[in-house]
């Protein structure tokens, strides 16, 4: 996605898109661990999430939220390290999708 197109979304929509990628990442890892999928696509989704968060940070209207956005990225790291479970990370990111519903 181009930054021009991304910047047209408000922050709730941007983070709701990140939420979708987080959900896909959790599902991909679980499918791999259960043997449903032959490959683990967690890293691929993680890269997409980092890119979307980077675009969100670079969006001029979000300049004052950069620290908050980076902290949210750290929550994903906590999930990857096993510090928080799937339910936690899914609830954490769902707040953004819920906000625009």
Image: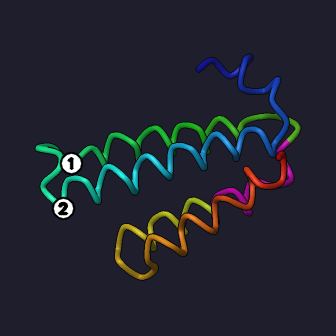
- Residue furthest out toward the bottom: 83
Q: Residue 6: horizontal and vertical position, in percent?
A: 71, 26
Prevailing secondary structure of the magenta residues? helix
Q: Nearer the viewer, mark 2 or mark 1?
A: 2
Q: Residue at x 49, y 63 (%)?
A: 76
Magenta-drawn stretch contains 16: no
Q: Residue at x 21, y 48 (%)?
A: 40
83 vs 64, nearest the viewer: 83
The magenta segment is: 62-70
Q: Quadrant of residue 35?
A: bottom left
Say if 49 sits above or below 76 in the image: above
**Mark 2 highlights which residue?**
33
Q: Residue at x 80, y 30 (%)?
A: 9
Q: Residue 28: horizontal and vertical position, in percent?
A: 31, 49
Q: Residue at x 55, y 64 (%)?
A: 90
Let me know if residue 57 appears in the view: no
Question: Is 96 left, or right, of 41 in this rendering?
Answer: right
Task: Give neighbour class at mark 1: few <14, some 14-19, many 20+ (Cα, 10 Å).
Answer: some
The quarter of the picture where the N terminus appears is: top right
Q: Secondary structure at mark 1?
A: loop
Q: Secondary structure at mark 2?
A: helix
Question: Is 91 left, or right, of 41 in this rendering?
Answer: right
Question: Number of numbered discs present?
Answer: 2
Say if 51 sits above or below 31 in the image: above
Q: Quadrant of residue 62?
A: top right
Q: How is the image coloured?
A: rainbow
Magenta-drawn stretch contains 65: yes
Disc 2 and disc 1: Cα gap in Å?
8 Å
Say if 6 sits above or below 43 in the image: above
Let me know if residue 73 appears in the view: yes
Task: Give neighbour class at mark 2: few <14, some 14-19, many 20+ (Cα, 10 Å).
Answer: few
**Mark 1 highlights which residue?**
40
């Amino acid at each position: 996605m181009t930054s021009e197109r991304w910047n047209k979304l408000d922050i709730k929509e941007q983070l709701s898109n990140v939420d979708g990628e987080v959900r896909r990442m959790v599902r991909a890892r679980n499918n791999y661990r259960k043997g449903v999928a032959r490959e683990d696509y967690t890293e691929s989704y993680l890269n997409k999430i980092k890119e979307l968060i980077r675009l969100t940070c670079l969006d001029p209207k979000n300049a004052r939220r950069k620290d908050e956005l980076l902290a949210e990225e750290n929550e994903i790291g906590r999930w990857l390290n096993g510090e928080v479970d799937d339910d936690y990370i899914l609830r954490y990111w769902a707040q953004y999708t819920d906000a625009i519903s």
